[in-house]
Amino acid sequence: MDTENDYHKPVMLNETDKYLITSLSGYYVDCTFGGGGHSLFLLNKHKNIKIIAFDQDETSLKRFETNPNLTSVKDRIIFCNDNFRNIEKNLKDLNIPKISGLLADLGVSSKQLDDKSRGFSFNSDAVLDMRMDKRQTLSAYEAVNTFSKEKLERIFFEYGEESFARQIAQKIVDTRIKTNIKTCNQLKDIICTVKYSKGNINPATKVFQALRIYVNDELGSLKDLLNSLENILEPKARAVIISYHSLEDRIVKQSFKAAQTLKIINKKVITATEEEIKNNPRSRSAKIRVSEKIYE
């Protein structure tokens, strides 16, 4: 599978396999199928497992249906075109009461970010959008053009940890009085009048991240998923969560600690090897936390 060119290289494949697979048969859930890198690796290595693959992006479903690399394992994949927060409902519909393990790679697909028509990239004249699931109503365009200054400031600070949140929110409100802020480039240019570039990081990075997280309710979805774990994991089944920024990692850590029927497998987060970071720079910020169901 051309995961490197089409999506991104899946991070920490060997570590995922080591900590996730406790039963050599049964159903495993891949909460963020994307380009299918993790799923394909696991299915090829373990011939008796099946994977329930979640992805709310309909383009991922289309790629799944037409990808020749998946032909040999397609009979062992069930695809759910839905947000992983709805995992309990989907498993119930499939008549699968318990699963043998769960993987969630919370990194955003580079395919989505690089597709400029999707309105994620600040280097684009596309209309601000940022919806991972195009069926949802709220878009970044609506947020930027209708939310109050106070609400925008809170989003930028809480979800982007943006220190210039107040000034950027004020500038957005001042600008939209005269004209709607329609495109990604327009928003980026507004941000750049308030905040100057430092090094290789674009000044708009944190604001765009914050809008993406808010529009897609990424942290709310993660909390719902984590709250479902105790209900869906069979004894000795594990949840392997790969996060990429402190907001996600904090939620995962706190949820694992609070769970009554889960034990934490790794006290310290698992990170990529130096060799992997060299070959796949995206893995530098990846952190794995693992918990295991101990009893019903």
Image: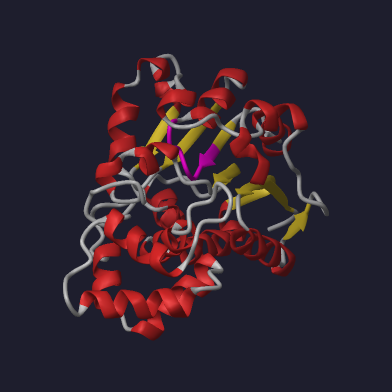
Question: Considering depth in this image, is 96 or 51 the residue closer to the camera?
Answer: 51
Which x, y percent locates residue 82?
A: 35, 50
Is the residue 137 above or below the residue 98 in the image?
below
In depth, the one of 60 and 162 nearer the eye is 162
Among all residues in the image, which is located at the extreme left? 179
The relative height of residue 144 versus residue 22 in the rendered view (above or below) is: below
User: Residue extending furthest right?
Assistant: 267
Q: Residue at x 41, y 66 (%)?
A: 214
Please state which of residues 244 and 157 is positioned toward the viewer in this rendering.
157
Is 68 in front, or is 73? 68
Please indicate whether residue 168 sits to the left or right of residue 143 in the image. Answer: right
Residue 10 versus residue 175 in the image, above or below: above
Question: Where does residue 99 sit, x and y in percent of width and height?
Answer: 56, 44
Is residue 286 visible to the viewer in this orientation of the structure? no
Q: Is residue 132 left or right of residue 248?
A: left
Image coordinates of residue 210 in percent, x first then y, are 45, 64
Q: Is residue 283 left or right of residue 264?
A: left
Would you say residue 118 is visible in this rendering? Answer: yes
**What segment carries the magenta color?**
28-35
Q: Magenta stretch containing residue 211, yes or no?
A: no
* Residue at left offset 72%, top offset 52%: 291
Quarter of the rendering occupied by the C terminus: bottom right
Q: Position of residue 10 (x, y in %)?
A: 56, 32
Q: Please determine whether, in this image, residue 96 is positioned above or below residue 230.
A: above
| Residue pictured at 56% horizontal, 18% vertical | 44
**Magenta span: helix, strand or loop, mainly?**
loop
